Image (cartoon, grey):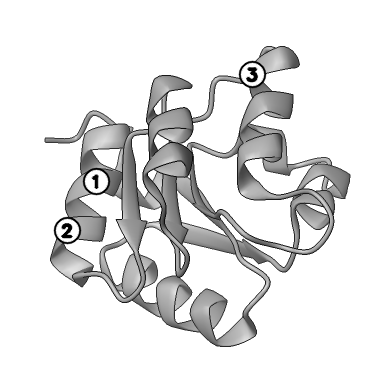
Amino acid sequence: MTKSGITICVVDDDPSVCKALSRLIKSSGFSVKTYGSAQEFLDDDHSMGSDLLVLDVRMPGMNGLKLQNHLAASGHKIPIVFITAYENGMTKTKATAAGAVAFFQKPFDEKDLLGAIYKGLNLT
């Protein structure tokens, strides 16, 4: 699979984060879709064809951990890289125990995030 054939979805309730991550990920040659909530992601019929999620933990409505659990329970094995402004050890432990590729606290290093994306896509 070429990088141009890979779609990464960013789910974050902060539009400025979605915009910045979209630019960063596109600059690495990937296709990007952004969503302002977990429900918006789930409501998009094409979202389940995503190759990887960059997912915020704290969002109104369904939070990132609940979306991760929902996807797993539904049989969707999409690699997830979590980002959050409110890290605590328990949240990180839950996310990684459930299979998250990586967990970053905002602000994070762009190279580290891209490295985690490549790892999640098995492109390293």
Q: Quadrant of residue 14?
A: bottom right
- The answer to whether marks 1 and 2 mark residues whose Cβ atoms lie closer than 8 Å is yes
Judge from the rendering whether residue 99 lies leftward or rightward of residue 16; answer left or right: left
Q: Residue at x 25, y 58 (%)?
A: 113
Few, some or many residues within 10 Å of mark 3 (<14, 14–19, 20+): some
| Circle 3 SS class | helix
Up/down of 93 relative to 15, above or below: above
Q: Quadrant of residue 68?
A: top right
Judge from the rendering whether residue 46 lies leftward or rightward of residue 56; answer left or right: right
Task: Please name the residue that numbered disc 2 is placed on.
Answer: 112
Who comes first in sequence, dot 3 or dot 1?
Answer: 3
In three-dimensional space, the C-alpha distance between marks 3 and 1, rounded to whole angstroms, equals: 20 Å
In three-dimensional space, the C-alpha distance between marks 2 and 3, rounded to whole angstroms, equals: 25 Å
- The answer to whether marks 2 and 3 mark residues whose Cβ atoms lie closer than 8 Å is no
Task: Please name the residue that numbered disc 3 is placed on.
Answer: 72
Position of the C terminus by quadrant: top left
Q: Quadrant of residue 85?
A: bottom left
Whole-percent x, y for residue 109 in the image: 19, 70
| Residue type, label 1 | Ala
Q: Residue at x 55, y 75 (%)?
A: 18
Q: Residue at x 26, y 70 (%)?
A: 108
| Residue type, label 3 | Ala
| Circle 1 SS class | helix
Few, some or many residues within 10 Å of mark 1 (<14, 14–19, 20+): many
Up/down of 108 relative to 121, above or below: below
Who comes first in sequence, dot 2 or dot 3?
Answer: 3
In three-dimensional space, the C-alpha distance between marks 1 and 2, rounded to whole angstroms, equals: 6 Å
Q: Nearer the viewer, residue 64 or 74?
A: 64
Task: Please name the residue that numbered disc 1 is placed on.
Answer: 116
